[in-house]
Image (spheres, rainbow, N blue to C red):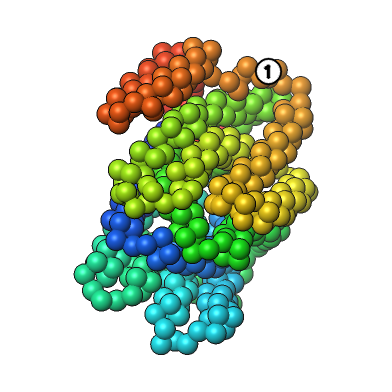
Amino acid sequence: LGYVRVRDDMVVQEPGFVRGYAYLFLTQVMSRLLPFVVNIMVARRLTPEEYGVPTVHFQLISTIILTCREGFRRALMRDAGSGTADSDVTDASQEAAGWLVIPIGTALSAGVPCAVLRLGGLEMDSPYAQAVAYYGFSAFLELLAEPFYIRAQRRSRFRLRFVTETMATVLRSLVTFYFVNFTERHVSLGFAFGQLAYGVTILICYAIAQLDFAYIGCALFLGKTKVKWGGTLRLVQTFSTQALLKLFLAEGEKGVLLMVGNADSQGVYGLVSSLGSLFVRIVLQPFEEIAFVAFSKKNNSQTTKRKKIENEAKVFATLMRVSGMLGLLVAVHGPLYSELAIRLLYGKQWADTKDVTKSLGAFSVMVLILALNGTSEAYAHAVMKPNELNGSNVALLSTSLLNIIMSIYLQPRVGPTGLIISNSISMCLRFAYTMSFVVNERFRGCKLTMATFFPHHVVCLAFIGSFVTTSVTSKLDMWTHILAGFVSVSGILMSILFYERNTLTNIVELKTRRKMD
């Protein structure tokens, strides 16, 4: 993939929206589905208390450290140059800015594990303490690879990302499975060794594929290269603030769970989050990423601003309609198949655990909100001006605080389901704020009706019919219920194929990079 500059006519080789999505989808399939399968095999032999340590404690540590890279990713993708000759210097400066994540990441990789060990009063001879240290070092290796990752993404090298993350994920899964099942090592160390193997592989693969960029990084740190940052650093700061607020919002409920929840609740939430987010990570996240890339690219054509906004409005409505249909597939069927999924995948021990079925059903409904909010924010963050991004960050902070307060109140009363309810409410508020900006500010004067965002009425009837049918069969035997679900989903997909053909065609024709004059 990637793009090629040709000096004479400036023709750009473009990966299409669908092709780019396909690579990102396959990347998520390998990086999420394989660990999910391994986690199922591991979870079957662990208690909820044992399972909660690697899925809640260690994941939270890694997320805190790696959050520092999210601002760089968003800012440097959003500020990507247009590919014209006079933007080469700007492109080089923006790519070089990716190296600034390393000193920040080094401090966090050392500071966060040390803080955890000190606050917990842990000694390094404890398996838990050793695992924390390994997770910190693994995060440091991933941050060393971050400049290479950003450069590959800016150049739409999705195939490189697919190969790299597939190799790293396979190795992590094999190492984790081996140490947990075939050695006497503590469970925590088994997961830590797997994560360490992942970090090493990510760094080696990205660095080998772009060795020339390593020399640029060395020259930058040695002061041999001067870089014109322009407004890049300001954009990095804005998106880094946003990333911290999202961390507070997304991981705040885990902090609440550690403070006021028991070990079983942590295990239940870890399992529900792992299973429930599978669809989000595999299907929705690549969709949001490629949408952000598509809207972030600068357009040097002679199209008037009004015409450009009208075209954006049509594309945005199309993406929102697709997101809504994807989210509805899970929201309609998830609650009715939660218990069956847990019993088949994790066994009777987990199926009989208190709150697990109810929590997974609630998470399924939240997927619809996640789908709509993810796509709307992808567009808004790609086109907002710095002052508008700052306003969005203030709104995000407000919803984050509300989420934490509601989580503290609801978790002791309704268990892990309370965390999902509070997260859903705060997500709805974020979605309302983003849509208010999009409709009232960005698309003001555009001829968009509410019907533009909804699927065809036949598709809506197919969803309603599927819900009614599977609600009835949920009270019958297992195989009848499974067959009804298969037939219902097939009917929905067929209705989408026939009555949303124009929507699908528009998606196929959408490019991740605009043609250059």
Q: Position of residue 439 (x, y in %)?
A: 72, 29
Q: Viewed as shown, does residue 308 lie left or right of 208? A: right
Q: Residue at x 24, y 66 (%)?
A: 181
Compared with 295, 477 (above or below) is above
Q: Residue at x 60, y 66 (%)?
A: 259
Q: Residue at x 23, y 74 (%)?
A: 183
- Using the image as rendered, state which of residue 2 and residue 361 is in the foreground: 361
Quarter placement of the C terminus: top right
- Using the image as rendered, state which of residue 367 and residue 388 is in the foreground: 367
Q: Viewed as shown, does residue 190 lie left or right of 221? A: left
- Circle 1 Cα neighbour tier, 10 Å, few/some/many (<14 / 14–19 / ≥20): few
Q: Position of residue 488 (x, y in %)?
A: 37, 21
Would you name the residue on which mark 1 appears?
A: 449
- Using the image as rendered, state which of residue 87 and residue 95 is in the foreground: 95
Compared with 103, 165 (above or below) is above
Helix, strand or loop status at disc 1: loop
**Which amino acid is tagged 1?**
Thr
Q: Position of residue 126 (x, y in %)?
A: 42, 83
Q: In this rendering, does residue 139 appear at all?
A: yes
- Using the image as rendered, state which of residue 202 and residue 29 is in the foreground: 29
Q: Position of residue 367 (x, y in %)?
A: 52, 38
Q: In this rendering, does residue 304 appear at all?
A: no
Q: Residue at x 58, y 68 (%)?
A: 100
Quarter placement of the N terminus: top left
